[in-house]
Amino acid sequence: MNAKKILAMILALCLMLMATACGSTTPQSQIKGDLNNNGQIEVGQEGVDVEVNLSDVHMDAAEAFAAGHWEALFTPVQIEGRALDMLNFDLTPTAEEKAAMEKEPAYGKPVVYMMSDGCTSGPTVADDLKYYTEAGLTADGLKGMSVVEALGTGKATVAVNHIATMLVPITNGVDMTFVGGAHIGCKTLYVLNDSQYKTTEDLKGTNISVPNGIGNADYNITCMMLDADGINPQTDVTLMQVTADACVSAMERGEISACLLSDSFAYAMVKDGKLRAIRSLLDEDFAHNNCCVIAMNRTYVEQNPVHAKKIIQAVQKAHSFMRENTAEATQYLLDRGWNAGDFDMNVMLNGSMQFGTTDAFTQASLKQIVDNYLRLGLIQSMNNADEIMALAWRPVLD
């Protein structure tokens, strides 16, 4: 028996001893919906009672489910230098900042943020907590547009969304750039719990669903997961679109073997014994990568560097609140309809995402993702990683 299996058995035993002390059951709250209405943010299942056994030991997806302690997947891998601490930061502009802001074209105009919920709600939370006001700014929310269209046309100033949604459009000339790190995790590859598929290796020769379509975020993320395990996403499997709400039925009919889903959407089906995770952005090798980042209109950043800095300080202060006060922040989000479902579930999921990452962590993460996208052919319009980084990464914090 190899060392990895022995470690998994030891961790499983520890988790079994802890489980009885940590469980709780709470009915789900009423789902209030997706503020940005673009299909990127999915919510959990209504009307399902859940029980969460929190763990202080991380296990990767396949190991956690094999050991019968799937909740261990959502204990984040601890990585030094990942967390950006802005919780007690004074956002008030200095005299020098105020003088500089008065000379920038954006002075006196509201920050327009993409209104969103769940894991991309940082800019919305920043407004609700009056962080933009503290930073000497006014703010308006925008919804009903895709993040690429809103930022690219300048109709929105700032948003949080998937790297996988925005990186390729940036290389195709869309006028936006990444300015800070939002969080890790949030997407996982699921199979039917009673299926024969135990690892991604078992998926060779099968169909896998990427719910928001070929060439979009789910496709790019799935390609990265498969590639990390030595599986060619173009030749070893067939990626196809089946919407998230139809994935389970498609798996039961044998049309697909697996589906990439947001963890909040899949949660109730996991708890009900319907689904099982085999690969996740929360796995240790992906815990060094951002899933979502803060993005801004690139022209705005170039013309208004001090405004951009104050905006990102406000959003990152909101992220620090969400990370450092997970239970309080979860209740706050539930009360406003920006999280949906059971309180304990959301505490676990929100805690797993480690909101607010440092520029150093985000830059290293983005560089690795750019290299992988180029190697996999996901980026077609540019072929130089340094040029892509110069276009896509414009950190604004001092």
Image (spheres, helix red, strand yellow):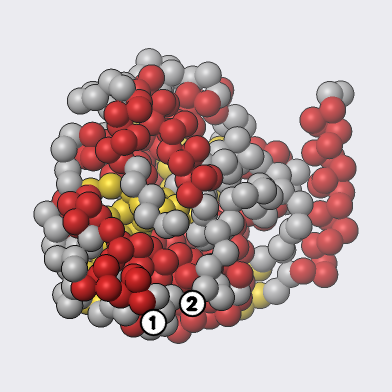
Residue visible at 22% across and 52% down in the picture: 302
In this view, the residue in front, 305 or 236, is 305
Residue 87 position by quadrant: bottom right
**Which amino acid type is marked by label 1?**
Glu
User: Residue 28, percent across and down?
Assistant: 51, 76
Residue with the most extreme top position: 235
* Distance of label 1 from label 2 (alpha carbons): 8 Å
Looking at the image, residue 237 sits to the left or right of residue 72; the answer is: left
56 up-or-down from 376: above or below: below
Residue 134, numbered circle: 1
The answer to which image quadrant residue 392 occupies is: top left
Using the image, determine if residue 394 lies above or below residue 387. Answer: below
Q: Give x and y (percent) for residue 237.
A: 41, 22
Residue 352's spot in the image, x, y percent?
Answer: 59, 57
| Horizontal relation, residue 280 to residue 208: left or right | right
> What's the amino acid at mark 2?
Asp
Residue occupying the point 72% across, 63% down:
53
Q: Quadrant of residue 340?
A: bottom left
